[in-house]
Image (cartoon, rainbow, N blue to C red):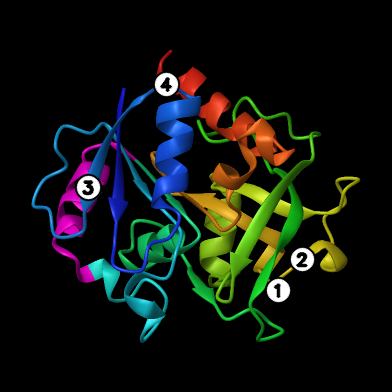
Amino acid sequence: MKFGVITFPGSNCDQDMIYVLETIMGYEVERLWHKDADLKGADFIVLPGGFSFGDYLRSGAIANYSPIMSEVIKHANNGGYVMGICNGFQILCESKLLPGTLLHNDHQKFMCRNVFLKADNNSSIINQHVPSSEVLKIPIAHAEGRYFATDEILKEMNANDQIIYKYCDENGNVDANSNPNGSLENIAGVCNARKNVFGMMPHPERAADSALGNIDGLKIFESMMNLVNA
């Protein structure tokens, strides 16, 4: 399994992601630039967090037109794996690889703190080996993380188990008090209907090294790798 991590102008979590995948997980990682015309043999593409193109217009809107995105879309449409974290999630929604969109937080403030989340189901590689009863503590850092979709789309997503993670409190309760940004249904992460494209606002790569005192994010990566390599 070879990963490809894309750097856009303004990305600031690309090196964190590369460190986790390469140094901690031990996988080969291809460094991809947003102007590259191919994926250089990468099997699993990751769009990291940050502020691509300064978040002008809308977060992820300009990055969606980077040359490499046409290759990412082809890769996803051919069944290849793609994951977007935070700004990467926003880009994947802009590209229509994921349903819905990310709006400004309901309190109109940038948030950077630890939150709690749990798997809503176990139907995709990103959450299949994470027990739905287990609460994970993962950092967030965003101003536009409020997930929104129409009632019709949400109904379809729930029927297809496309909601992969929801915000909760430390006891696993999913309610308004545990929702950091006003996301509909406390949604923290989703996947496409085919379950090969994933997006989440929390940063598991920032909670994957024991030196940081938190490895809850590593559980997501380990679960994913077990199934990818099965």
**Residue 230 higher or lower than 124, as above or below:** above
Q: CA distance from mark 3 to mark 4?
A: 18 Å
What residue type is disc 3 on?
Leu
Comes first in the chain, label 4 or label 1: 4
Residue type at mark 1: give it.
Gly
Residue at the disc numbered 1:
182
Q: Nearer the viewer, mark 3 or mark 2?
A: 3
| Bounds of the magenta segment | 65-81
The residue tagged 4 is 26
Q: Quadrant of residue 188?
A: bottom right
Mark closer to the chain start, 2 or 4: 4
- Majority secondary structure in the magenta region: helix
The quadrant the N terminus occupies is: top left
Residue indicated by mark 2: 179
Q: Where residue 230 appears, x then y in whole percent?
A: 43, 13
Q: Contact (CB < 8 A) between labels 3 and 4? A: no
Q: Measure the C-alpha gap from mark 3 to mark 1.
A: 33 Å
Numbered tag placed on residue 32 in the rendering: 3
Sequence-wise, the earlier of marks 3 and 4 is 4
199 sits to left or right of 210: left
| Label pair 1/2, CB-CB below 8 angstroms | yes
